[in-house]
Image (cartoon, grey):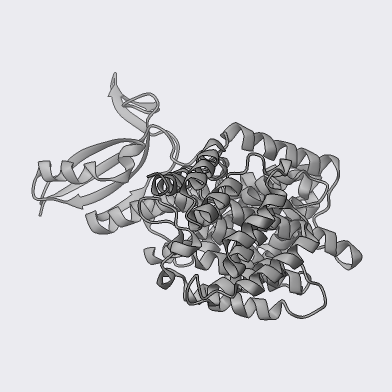
Amino acid sequence: MNDSALAVDHLFRHQSGRMVSTLTRIFGPRRLDLAEEVVQDALLKALELWPFEGIPANPSAWLIQVAKNRALDVIRREASLAQKIPDVARAFPDHAMPDSLHDFDDDQLSMMFLCCHPSLAGELRVALTLKTVAGFSVREIARAFLVEEATIAQRLVRGKRQIREQRIDFEMPAGPGLRPRLDSVLEVLYLLFNEGYSAHEGESLLRADLCDEAIRLAGLLCSHPVSDLPKTHALLALLLLQASRLPARVNAEGDLYLLRDQDRSLWDRALIAEGLSQLDLSGEGDELSSYHLQAGIAAQHALASSYDATDWEDITEQYDQLYQIDPSPIIALNRAIALSRWKGPEAGLAVLSQIEHHPALAHYHLLPATLGELFSELGQKEKAAQYYNSALDCVCTEPERRLLQRRLSENIY
Amino acid sequence: MPQFILLLRDERRPGSGFSPEEMQKLIQKYGDWRRSKAIGGQKLTDGEGRVLRKQNGKPSVMDGPFAEAKEVMGGFFVIEAANFDEAVETAKTCPHMEFGSIEVRQIQPT
């Protein structure tokens, strides 16, 4: 009996993702439901026994053994799966030491490639990845994304149906097929992370879990020869560097702190160091992805001793390059902010006047919020207040709303 | 110190609809409770129990749950407490209270 074994964070979640992946390989992607059912049964059995008997010395091995027995039961029940028995025996060795089971890692990666297949709609990819690879429940996904449980459940049903109908294989893509498949996986991880990072209120623990999962899965990609590409390291660097600022971003009351106002001593130095070393690894090869540039910008922030001492010139240049890759008005807005830190608020306003009426930014609160900041810096309080008011008219999260209201009240006299 | 047995009956199965994370947290909760409060415990097998009774001179065997129709005995814990009231207070803190009923019985000291 060794209850401390369960002190491993998210052991069930991660073990569930591993076992669902391996069973999906054995049963085939068409039987994803069955794989999930087997794993759920194994976890439930632990939930029934362990409260009374304590936790076994090796909880992962216990779960694997029970899932294996359950899988064999299922296979014996279904004639169509009869030839799979040796596969189960091979994949779930007796007395398994989970850390040595590299197959599980391979299977998890293949599972990610399956869930993030480019022929599936984006929202289906995210839901499938979270449910199967990351071991989230429908309710947890719904809470993290602030949508109805039924919506997530529908997405999962649709995703699984499309996997069946399109006969998507369980495989580790290779050769020329790899790039687009990998891009899709990276994009899903990027979305996962951003969802966790965004300033929604409530369920903050779950949102932090999203960030952790995105980082864990990106790390998994980096550690496998097939997906270990500079771009993968660039994404991981970006996620680590962004995550390093999380502790300083929101206080206990849920109030949001902008970069300028953050207590930099709260930044996670270990994550920064890891992020910078991943950024080094991303430097090989000649591809400069948007992840490289975003990570480069995040690194400049991480290295600066203060907001004012930040190398805004370099950041502006990286935004220029980013704009070449992705000419979106949001990037133009961020570039204008960096420029205004480098050359002053007037320079920022001059650029913003060119994109101010871009239709894509019509309801985007950060545009008027930025204009408000710049006018406030120039001492034009009335104009600043006007823009803060229009920002408040847009849809934004509660912590952002409170921040805007604080700014507004500072500019009313 | 007097010993008490806590009989745990499930009204609803914890688990269905739980995420892996929630299951792990629940097991941890039971584990923390058991380590600080109980001196023993055991899971009982799923399925119904039987009651034997002599009827017309012959033993008759009755299947089934006996208290509430839906309740199934999940397992038991043994705890030590100064008196019955204290045992009841301890039982109240058991995570199982979210999922069913607990019957407290004192074991006759030898």
Q: x%, y% of residue A97?
A: 57, 71
Q: In percent of the image, x 43 and y 66: which residue is there?
A: A5
Q: Is residue A238 shown left or right of residue A403? A: right
Between residue A299 and residue A367, name the one nearer to us: A367
Q: In percent of the image, x 60 and y 70: which residue is there?
A: A342
Q: Is residue A340 shown left or right of residue A258? A: right
- Write down the quadrant of residue A92 in the picture: bottom right
Between residue B37 and residue A211, name the one nearer to us: A211
A172 shown above or below A410: below
- Is residue A297 among the parts visible in the rendering? yes
A125 shown above or below A102: above
Q: In percent of the image, x 28 and y 45: which residue is there?
A: B94
Q: x%, y% of residue A339?
A: 64, 65
Q: Is residue A391 shown left or right of residue A72? A: left
Q: Quadrant of the N terminus of chain A?
A: bottom left
Q: x%, y% of residue A179?
A: 84, 64
Q: Quadrant of the C terminus of chain A?
A: top left
- Is residue A65 among the parts visible in the rendering? no
Between residue B1 and residue A147, name the one nearer to us: A147
Q: In percent of the image, x 83 and y 77: which residue is there?
A: A286
A31 shown above or below A181: above
Between residue A181 and residue A68, name the one nearer to us: A181
- Write down the quadrant of residue A298 in the picture: bottom right
Q: x%, y% of residue A10?
A: 50, 59
| Labels in figure, total | 0
